[in-house]
Image (spheres, grey):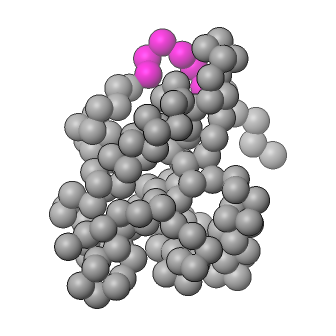
Amino acid sequence: MIEVRQGTSKDIEQLVVLFEAYRNFYRQQPAKDQATQFLSERFINNDSVIFIAFDQSKNEAVGFTQLYPTFTSIRMKKSWILNDLFVSEKRRGQGISKLLINAAKEHCIATKTFGLLLETERTNIVGNKLYPSTGFTKETSNFYYWINK
């Protein structure tokens, strides 16, 4: 059975394994020490909310999603960015991503925020099928611009 719950600093060790696999998916070099530090700081500073999916029978973390807060001035409300979503390769296709997304959506309701935004690569075939199936709609009315230094 899969349980999704909000992560804590006690989950760092298992979370780092998933986080590094997630970064690898996006073609990043391994950096376990930096990943541990980065995630530890998110917990210490309350910069994000992380939900983790656990296989209770094995007491093993099998997926996670990380939300970052932001604000919308137009609507004068807080909103969330679903920045990271990852399920271990051997556990994909079992509905774990949907459980994690549902936890994120419930968190948005509980925190009375405007909404939940995410971004993914155009080449992410699985993600681009998953997100609309969980209620996300593709934004077509706005352009997004980046400065990447």
Which range is magenta?
Answer: 139-144
Q: Residue at x 73, y 74 (%)?
A: 37
Q: Give the percent coordinates (x, y) of residue 136.
A: 35, 31
Q: Can residue 44 be seen in this view?
A: yes
Q: Is residue 25 magenta?
A: no
Residue at 30% in and 68% down: 3
Give the residue drawn at x 34%, y 85%. Answer: 59
Query: Which secondary structure type mostly characterizes the magenta part of the structure?
Result: loop
* Residue shown at the point (61%, 46%) measured from the top left: 68
Q: Is residue 25 left or right of residue 53?
A: right
Q: Can residue 29 be seen in this view?
A: no
Above/below status of 20 relative to 51: below
Depth order, front residue of 48/19: 48
**Closest to the observer, 11 or 84:** 11
**Residue 15 in the image, given as x and y percentages of width and height:** 51, 74
Total numbered circles: 0
Q: Position of residue 4 (x, y in %)?
A: 35, 63
Question: What x and y, as percent, mark residue 123?
Answer: 39, 45
Q: Is residue 95 left or right of residue 120?
A: left
53 on left or right of 26:
left
Depicted 114 relative to depicted 17: above or below: above
- Residue 96 versus residue 120: which sits nearer the camera? 96
Quadrant holding the N terminus: bottom left
Q: In terms of image quadrants, where is residue 137?
A: top left
Q: Outermost residue, right direction? A: 149
Hey, which residue is sitting farthest bottom in the picture? 58
